[in-house]
Image: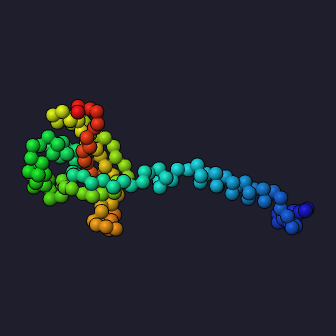
Amino acid sequence: MEYYKENDIYHGESRPSLKKLTLAAIIVLIVGLCLTPSVARSQEAPQRIRALFCDTAEQVKEVLLATDVQEVVESINARDGENSCGRIDALADSTEDAEQVIKGDKTYAIVKVHIVGMILGPGMVLPAEIIQYAARRLEGLGT
């Protein structure tokens, strides 16, 4: 098909260069979207974690080194705020080791946890976005 230019307006049934440019733009857009990491793809799927969480790594260390955990948790909550430490059933999408603590013959990692929800009961999740700290035992180290 032929086309011609008249007063900067293209006439005719077909515009080969415009079609090619449009196709090229669509291809570039699709490839760009596929190669661009999205927030949803860059995060891990949330995992359910049941643990004693605290507001700071220092509080978790206090709990780990205690002989009476319940007494220390109550003491921390009285000193730092009612919900500074407590058991939570949570959904977390990332964890990061903060430091290691040795207690007797066991080694623990204090873990920084990004909580995205708290599980209140069967099928009931309260959305939340908070950073908390917990401990996990390291296998094969100091055991």
Residue at 88 percent across and 67 percent down: it is 12
Residue at 30 percent across and 61 percent down: it is 118
Q: Nearer the viewer, residue 29 or 64?
A: 64
Q: Position of residue 97 (x, y in %)?
A: 31, 41
Mark count: 0
- Up the image or down, 127 lies above or below 111; here it is below
Q: Quarter of the image for the N terminus: give it.
A: bottom right
Res 76 seen here: no
Residue reaching furthest top? 142
Q: Quadrant of residue 65?
A: top left
Residue at 22 percent across and 47 percent down: it is 56
Residue at 29 percent across and 46 percent down: it is 112
Res 140 seen here: yes
Q: Quarter of the image for the C terminus: give it.
A: top left
Determine whether, in the image, residue 33 is placed left or right of residue 23: left
Q: How is the image coloured?
A: rainbow
Q: Position of residue 60 (x, y in %)?
A: 19, 45
Q: Nearer the viewer, residue 75 or 2?
A: 75
Determine whether, in the image, residue 78 is placed left or right of residue 40: left
Q: Nearer the viewer, residue 111 or 130?
A: 111
